[in-house]
Amino acid sequence: MSSSSRICAAVRSAVTRSTIFNNAAIRPIRAQTLTRPALAPFRMFTTRAPDTSPAEPVIQHRRPHVTFSDDEWRQRLTPEEFVVLRRGGTEPPGTGEYVKHTADGVYHCTGCDAPLYKSTTKFDSGCGWPAFYDAVPGAVTRREDRSHGMMRVEIRCSSCDGHLGHVFHGEGFPTPTDDRHCVNSVCLSFTPAKSTPK
């Protein structure tokens, strides 16, 4: 069994044992539609992902950090989104909306709408969650995570500090970075390429 398969198997086992899902099962995403309150205006700055050509539109980031109380987050998010984004939960493998998603565009944070990943960095890792080999520059923050008896690197939205998933390095995937950003679908919303800012 490859190191990637062992890691995926360990994470699946940890998710199955987790009391988070014994008490509040994560269902397939988008079963509930919310009317989200509009975010307050933010100063904008732009960056360009490393794989883009000079002619491709830049991606805009929201700053400063988006901060809400737990009660406010519960009003903005579905119960599933709140458990994952604000409590560090994990959706069951193979259930997310974007696992097999292949359309061109940009994946945004469900919590604050900050752009996180371009579709050009998405690849099929076979692990049961959406995988990306790189994030939009500055969009993701990394933290050490020692939960479930494992040493992993957690990734969080740099704009609202929402939990996204974990990043793994050196698994041998044929990508430019040899990184696998393993992201929960519930943390993502998608904007098709034809709708991206120009």
Image (spheres, helix red, strand yellow):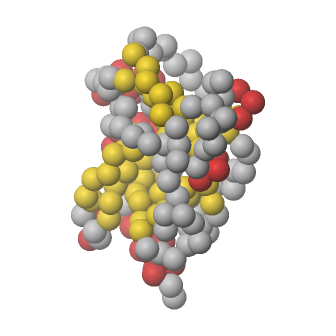
**Residue in the image at 52% along x and 19% along y:** 36
Residue 161, quarter of picture: top left
Q: Position of residue 23 (x, y in %)?
A: 39, 50
Q: Position of residue 131 (x, y in %)?
A: 55, 58
Q: What quarter of the picture does the C terminus occupy? A: top right
Image label count: 0
Q: Residue furthest bottom?
A: 1
Q: Position of residue 110 (x, y in %)?
A: 50, 33
Q: Is residue 192 visible?
A: yes
Residue 150, quarter of picture: bottom left
**Residue in the image at 71% along x and 35% along y:** 193
Q: Is residue 24 visible?
A: no
In the displayed structure, 82 sits above or below 1; it is above
Residue 13 relative to residue 28: left or right: left
Residue 137, quarter of picture: top left
**Residue in the image at 27% along x and 53% along y:** 143
In the displayed structure, 111 sits above or below 153; it is above
In the displayed structure, 3 sits above or below 138; it is below
**Residue in the image at 32% along x and 23% along y:** 64
Which of 14 and 117 lies nearest the eye of the viewer?
117
Residue 92 relative to residue 75: left or right: right
Q: Position of residue 99 (x, y in %)?
A: 63, 55
